[in-house]
Image: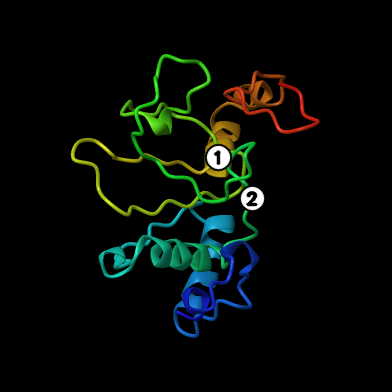
Amino acid sequence: KNIVDNNIDILTVSKNEFKLPNLGKKLEAMLQDILFGRGFYVIKGLPVHRYSRKESAIAYWGIGTYFGIPVSQNAKGHHLGHVKDIGKDPKNPTTRIYTTSWRQPFHTDNCDIVGLLCLKPAKKGGHSTIISSISLYNEMLKRNPKWVETLFKPFYYDRKNEVPEGKSP
């Protein structure tokens, strides 16, 4: 509430400014399970229907500060992205699929931990399937170490025409 009332930029908010005396301990335990256990966690029941979009974003951000340091989602520097059909052409190679009604294929995000918050369920579809890359790596190593070698070879990275300054396309 203090962040909203004082119009504080959420990009400046860290775990120290977002005190969660009871939930904070549970979030810290979840982080350990994410890093050293099963690799993911599902948190249900954040009452987004009671909050404005801005308040929901702040709550999501604040909870996220217990899991690490936020990084931008694209070359524009967005820290919070919205998975929403805004009518982009899915056949355009520069279109991010999450801006269309098309199903997203399996992909990786360029970070250690990904968080998702559903503000409004899709009328159709909208399901997410996740896997821990660390767990997948360990399972591949256990079943067939040769598979792991492929992960260390060069591969193409599609930036969808969003190339950060000073980086290769």
Provide residue 67's location: percent of width, then percent of height: 57, 62
Q: Position of residue 71 (x, y in %)?
A: 64, 50
Q: Is residue 96 left or right of residue 124?
A: right
Disc number placed over residue 133 in the picture, else none: 1
Seen in the picture, residue 12 relative to 169 is either above or below; the reply is below
Q: Give the residue displayed 64% in from the left and 27% down from the top.
A: 148
Query: Hey, what amino acid is under mark 2?
Result: Val
**Amino acid on which the number 1 mark rests in the picture:** Ser
Camera-nearest label, 1 or 2: 2
Real-space CA distance between mark 1 and mark 2, rounded to the nearest whole angstrom: 18 Å
Residue 94, position as x, y percentages in the image? 53, 20
Classed neighbour count for the residue bearing mark 1: other residues with Cα under 10 Å, few (<14), some (14–19), many (≥20): few
Pointer 1 or 2: first along the chain: 2
Instruction: Count neighbours of disc 2 (C-alpha within 10 A) and say few if under 14, some if 14 to 19, many if 20 or more.
Output: few
Q: In the displayed orientation, state which residue is furthest to the bottom.
A: 21
Name the residue: 41% across, 14% down: 91
Q: Residue at x 58, y 26 (%)?
A: 144
Q: Is residue 37 above or below residue 4?
A: above
User: Where is residue 124 shown, x and y percent of the image?
Assistant: 19, 36
In the image: residue 39, left or right of residue 88: right
Q: Secondary structure at mark 2?
A: loop
Q: Is residue 167 left or right of residue 14?
A: right
Query: Looking at this view, is 19 or 80 the one in front?
Result: 80
- Coloring scheme used: rainbow
Report the residue marked by disc 2. 71
Q: Quadrant of the N terminus?
A: bottom left
Q: Secondary structure at mark 1?
A: helix
From the image, which quarter does the C terminus lie in? Answer: top right
Q: Are marks 1 and 2 in contact (CB under 8 Å)?
A: no
